[in-house]
Amino acid sequence: MWRFFKFLIFSIIIVSLSFGIYKFSNRYDLNLIYENVDWSINTKGLGGAVSFDFDKENNLYIAFKNTIKIINNDNKEEILVNDKTLNIYDIACYNNDIIIASDNRVLLYDVNKEQYTELINGLPNNGLNYKTNIILNGDYLYISIGSNTNSGVVDENNKNEDKASFEWESTGIGYNNNYAFVPFGEKVIEGQKIKESVLSNASILRYDLNNNEFITYATGIRNVEGLAIDSLGKLIAIVGGMEDSGVRAVKDDADYIYDIKEKAWYGWPDFSGGDPITSPRFSDGTNKLSFVIANHPTEVTLGPRYQHDKVTALKGLTIDYEGKCFPKDTVIFADNVDNYIYVLTENGTSKAIVALDKDSYIEKIKYNDANIYILDSKGGCLYKIGGQINTAIFNLPNVIWIFITIFVMAIIIALMYKNKMKKSK
């Protein structure tokens, strides 16, 4: 009998230690809040990764600052690009090539010939929101260009002015003797014209890969933190709100999700979330804000599909355009402040589906082959979330089920051993 109890106690200790080791050593843990999805780790060892994409054969391409590697269906890895001149922000697979957004260029890399073709250069992304996002919709490539400034005006800490998307007429109102859309220290008077630039800040371009021509698709978009295409081919974007910093500080702004329409102006830097900057919403009385543009294309700008509860939080965006994991065209995005993955509900509110580790940082989220992939650059892994029929009693990682199985088997063996000992007597 004593031997039986020793064996049982030993089994309990082993399983308890296993649970403890798992709990404290597993930095890839996800806490699923939504019951009808399951998760797994698709790829590890991705610390510092900036983007990823899949080709038509579902080979996975992972981009780092100046490196791109491929992981094929057999889990074999190969370095495709290792170029110290690159500073990669985003990638997209196009036919058998890779489109790369790097510094102020967009390149097409021919994998077979190992050659670059420059699609566009001279992007004016030299300031605050310098990271370019790209996404494909057929042969159209959408390219985001962020604002160089927080709210349109340069200051001592950021002297990269924004390039105008229209021929603006200035109100002549400055902040600390600096003015919107002109270099640091340059004086502007009321009614002065500010020349339009071919490539402008706070804009989204649409590049036609068939004829190598581009248009400015939409403007007045401060900074894009994620792009996605729905089942109807419509463009959706996370747009970061203005911050409470700089000489034209904006109070209580938020991040947004917008439906992006061609030729639309979304209001930056004189509007945010559909509201004028002169609204009491953006001021506490200490920061008097005025328009810097006198000739707005419209005095009523398009509002967002969704307004978050904080600023500088949202990143990574995808859409379940097939309805495999969630209802068709469900929007999925990350909050890197509260560390949650959210979906947008039918009534336009957000619902948390995954609680992330506090040390996570989500760079990109993409939908591919009936699964949602989430790149955690700080945790160094690519998560895969897929829909499932909710027949499971508990939603636990496989390793936990293994521990439970071993524990049950240990008890059964112990009972069998005890029974054998009784018979031998």
Image (tube, grey):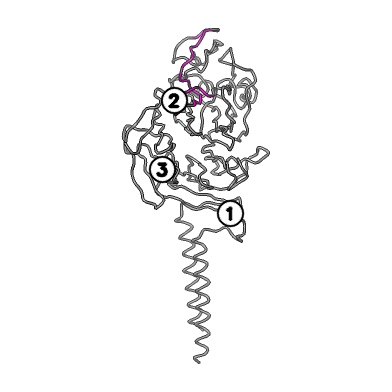
Please tell me which of labels 1 and 3 falls first in the chain. Answer: 3
Amino acid at the residue labelled 2: Asn
Q: Which residues are magenta?
A: 188-217
Q: Is residue 329 left or right of residue 56?
A: right
Kindly identify the residue that appears in the image at 36 percent across and 34 percent down.
109
Please tell me which of labels 2 and 1 falls first in the chain. Answer: 2
Kindly identify the residue that appears in the image at 48 percent across and 72 percent down.
11
Q: Between marks 3 and 2, how big is the CA–CA gap?
A: 26 Å
Q: Which mark is residue 211?
A: 2
Residue under label 1: 388
Kindly identify the residue that appears in the image at 62 percent across and 20 percent down.
278
Q: Is residue 70 magenta?
A: no
Question: How busy is the neighbourhood of tag 2: few (under 14 within 10 Å), some, or many (20 plus)?
Answer: few
In this picture, is 12 found above or below 170? below
Q: Secondary structure at mark 3?
A: strand
Q: Is residue 226 left or right of residue 105?
A: right
Residue 377: give x, y in percent of width and height. Answer: 44, 43
Amino acid at the residue labelled 1: Gln
Residue 230: give x, y in percent of width and height. Answer: 57, 37
Please tell me which of labels 3 and 2 falls first in the chain. Answer: 3
Q: Nearer the viewer, mark 2 or mark 1?
A: 2
Question: How busy is the neighbourhood of tag 1: few (under 14 within 10 Å), some, or many (20 plus)?
Answer: some
Q: Are marks 1 and 3 in contact (CB under 8 Å)?
A: no
Question: How busy is the neighbourhood of tag 3: few (under 14 within 10 Å), some, or many (20 plus)?
Answer: many
